[in-house]
Image: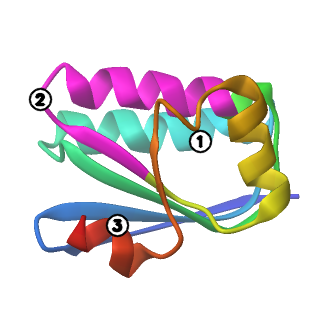
Amino acid sequence: MDLTLVTREVDGATIVAVEGEIDVYTAPKLRDKITELVADGSHHLIIDMEGVEFLDSTGLGVLVGGLKKVRAHDGSLQLVCNQDRLLKIFRITGLAKVFAIHASADAATSA
């Protein structure tokens, strides 16, 4: 399965809509996109995971790494996730307490 990334700007934040599987093979693509956005001055990121079908530990590592990158610039990284199976991963790993997780992109941009 491939990974599709589409970015757009909303109210000073950059939304990265992710579709597909975030695993050991595709996670570097997401990591590179986050690194590129931060280098270009986007320090408030919203990762929209509504189209994500699978997430493994490599993908979690990329999200944590992205959070560290934006925080180094006093930025933020929020997640949009409303799928129970993915939310369960965040709860089990304790990352639900680390990330601001919203049910929709609209909720994330107004937060």
**Mark closer to the chain start, 1 or 2:** 1
Residue at numbered disc 2: 74
Q: CA distance from mark 2 to mark 3?
A: 17 Å
Q: Mark 2 is on which residue type?
A: Asp
Q: CA distance from mark 1 to mark 2?
A: 24 Å
Q: What stretch of residues is rendered in magenta?
A: 60-78
Residue at numbered disc 1: 29
Asked if residue 75 lies in the magenta stretch, the reply is yes
Image quadrant holding the N terminus, namely bottom right
Determine whether the residue tagged by mark 1 lies in a helix, strand or loop.
helix
Figure quadrant of residue 73:
top left
Please give the name of the residue rendered at 41% of the width and 75% of the height, measured from the top-left corner.
105
From where the camera sits, is residue 83 visible?
yes
Q: Please say if the residues under marks 3 and 1 sit with CB atoms less than 8 Å apart.
A: no
Residue 104: x and y, percent? 48, 76
Q: Main secondary structure of the magenta part?
A: helix
Q: Mark 1 is on which residue type?
A: Lys
Judge depth for marks 1 and 2 and give the one in front: 2
Image quadrant holding the C terminus, namely bottom left
Q: Mark 3 is on which residue type?
A: Ala
Rate crowding at label 3 as few (under 14), some (14 to 19) or many (20 or more) other CA atoms within 10 Å.
Answer: many
How many tags in the picture? 3
**Mark closer to the chain start, 3 or 1:** 1
Query: Which residue is more in the foreground, 40 or 65?
Result: 65
Determine whether the residue tagged by mark 3 lies in a helix, strand or loop.
helix
